[in-house]
Image (tube, coloured by chain):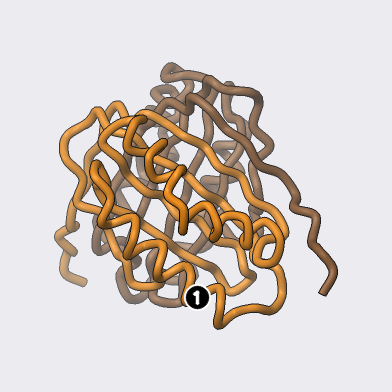
Chain colours: A brown, B orange
Amino acid sequence: MAGTGFASTPPPPYFAVIFTNQRADGGDAAYVATADRMVELAAAQPGFLGVESVRGADGLGITVSYWRDEAAIQAWRRHGEHTLARERGRNEWYQHFELRVAKVERAYGGPVRQEGP
Amino acid sequence: MAGTGFASTPPPPYFAVIFTNQRADGGDAAYVATADRMVELAAAQPGFLGVESVRGADGLGITVSYWRDEAAIQAWRRHGEHTLARERGRNEWYQHFELRVAKVERAYGGPVRQEGP
């Protein structure tokens, strides 16, 4: 899931699914292929707004996906291929994960103008 | 901010500040020292619940801090040393950032038992 960059989300309110995870050793090729496929599939779901994903050198990762509403999150959760991928994640790919569903209430940011040296 | 691992948060509701950022080139030593200091300071604020932080090899980072309520987030925002660090972040350390404040409504997870090979 490298290279997803920043999500272009609409004005709040919308929902965030914060998925923090520690990779287990091994299975990298299958993991990366599945993770890429999940991003591709998620992006095709109704109500998907974007995703931001980072993994550090120590195997800790944070993926935040953004959704229009709870119904969109629940529909994605029930998606068959996603359900199978989650089971494989629990059984093979992750040592530990924490998943939090949150309602985004305010947001700001953007590119930053750098000052000269 | 390496090595923060997982946050041990209480049952929801609580708040998450999702800070996605792309580092600018340079200033690494001052940045790391300040980032570490901000985690230390944040952890000492009333209502701080924990933090999870990852930076990828491409300089994209996600830091999620967890707070008891909006008042705790606002108090941390007004903290003098944090305010100065944010200004330096905008001027020197980040190319782009997005900050989202969200109310965590449900959460689950934990260590995963690995199946045998």
Chain under callout 1: B
Sort mark 1 into few (<14), some (14-19) or many (20+) by Cα contacts within 10 Å. Answer: few
Q: Position of residue B61 (x, y in %)?
A: 54, 61
Say whether residue A111 is left or right of residue A16. right
Corner quadrant of residue B59 = bottom right
Q: Nearer the viewer, residue B76 or A40?
A: B76
Corner quadrant of residue B70 = top left
Q: Which residue is identified by label 1?
A: B32
Q: Position of residue B39 (x, y in %)?
A: 36, 62
Q: Residue at x 65, y 48 (%)?
A: A6
A13 above or below A111? above
In terms of secondary structure, where does tag 1 sit?
Answer: helix
Amino acid type, residue under disc 1 in the picture: Val
Q: Nearer the viewer, residue B110 or B50?
A: B50
Say whether residue A109 is left or right of residue A94. right
B4 above or below B100? below
Q: Residue at x 33, y 72 (%)?
A: B3
Q: Residue at x 64, y 32 (%)?
A: A9
Q: Residue furthest front?
A: B80
Task: Specify the quadrant that holds the C terminus of chain B.
Answer: bottom left
Q: Position of residue B107 (x, y in %)?
A: 25, 36
Q: Nearer the viewer, residue B88 or B23?
A: B88
Say whether residue B107 is left or right of residue A39. left
